[in-house]
Amino acid sequence: MQNHHAPFFPAQQWDIFCRVIDNFGDMGVCWRLACALAARGQQVRLWTDDASALAWMAPQGCTGVQVRAWGSAFLPDERPSDVWVEAFGCEIAPDFIATSVSQSSARGQKPSWINLEYLSAERYVERCHALPSPVQQGPAAGWTKWFFYPGFTPATGGLLRESDLLQRQADFDVAAWRSAQPRAADATSTTPPNARWVSLFCYEPVALPALLAQCAQATTATRLLVTPGRATAATQAIGHEKSNQIANQPLSGNTNLLSISYLPAVTQAEFDEMLWACDVNFVRGEDSLVRALWAGKPLVWQIYPQTDNAHHAKLQAFLDWLQAPVSLRQFHAVWNGLIDAPLPELSAATLQEWSDCIGAARARLLTQSDLLSQLMGFCSRER
């Protein structure tokens, strides 16, 4: 297992650029990267066109990380860049590049220029990782960008993983966390000790009504933790009454074993703890998928839907890498709307099968170098 002790690199000035498309995903990845860099003694400027999500995602900020408005100018006597990270295909403002080119000429050192791509398990990632992309025009014509692809195999850039992650997980008290949670608004009593805890972070999956109906009619109680935003809106739009109609079984008395908690926005650390504390995690996008893998619990991923259905191949590639059993593939296909079929039952045997699968995948990932160690090593060699 690698990265118990992160390798040492001299302190450098990193500039990360983030144009927000989805407050949760784009900013989530960039903030984790910025904080991980700061934890290893690096100085970071995070340039973004929308920092509003940081008000709840990271209200305390992070020592060593400055958040800067997209397009704002360098401050007087500001340290020149050593590394540029363009996240998810955003392009650095020409004025920023021009200023940096001038600084680089004066100091005789160009910054390493990284194009940090989206996460995928598709085969092209291994082929394209760490390839150069010569800059043909603009103030930095003649310079080189480098493609850096996160991924799930040793031939990719790896996944973000903090140096202290495993220790924090080992020290985490699941029972204490659950006991500290307020009673669900619709619960008439405390959550039973044998209840199944489920987190829900999703868009608007077509199978959500079926999931609620299944939980309401199951023999095991379910405590459903619904994250704010689209997941809450989608769940509240369905409601218990409609989910019971779908199950074709009216509820009465204690038949309904589903209790729902609508959560407030939480910090990234608190989100991670929720994943560690739950028995099943429904996640979406990129950042929460990675965090759910590190949690090591059964997970269901709602991939970001694309109009040309390109996400279908991306989902299948992930399930192939995961070595997902048939039950997990079937659930993902229904949850993501790839097929029109009944939602498979979340039985104890099924969840154990999923747990074994995710645990094995997590173990494989832990033998690989994490994304930040690889990125820092790459930039050190490239310079």
Image (cartoon, grey):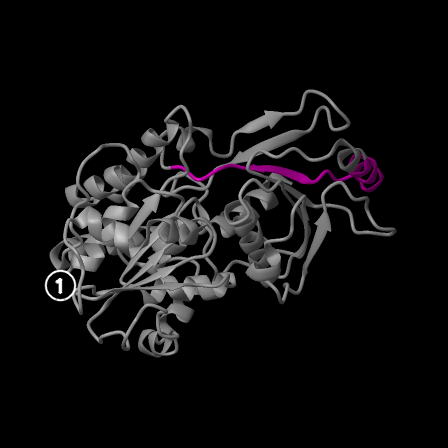
- Residue 29, how many percent across, how many down? 52, 49
The kind of secondary structure element at disc 1 is: loop
Taking 37 as reference, is 101 left or right? Answer: right
- Is 114 located above or below residue 192 in the figure? above
Q: Position of residue 235 (x, y in %)?
A: 36, 52
Q: Give the range drawn in magenta.
A: 99-120
Three-letter code, disc 1: Thr
Residue 5 in view in this figure: no
* Residue furthest out toward the right: 76
Left or right relative to 66: residue 95: right
Q: Which residue is more in the foreground, 150 or 324? A: 324
Front position in the image: 340 or 367: 340
Q: In this view, does 255 lie above or below 355?
A: below
Asked if residue 319 can be seen in this view, the reply is yes
* Residue 308 point in image, percent of width and height: 40, 23
Please say whether residue 52 is one of the residues in the magenta stretch. no
Q: How many marks?
A: 1
Q: Which residue is drawn at 59% across and 42% down?
A: 20
Q: Which residue lies furthest to the top in this view?
A: 136
Give the residue drawn at x 48%, y 38%. 118
Q: Name the residue under label 1.
A: 219
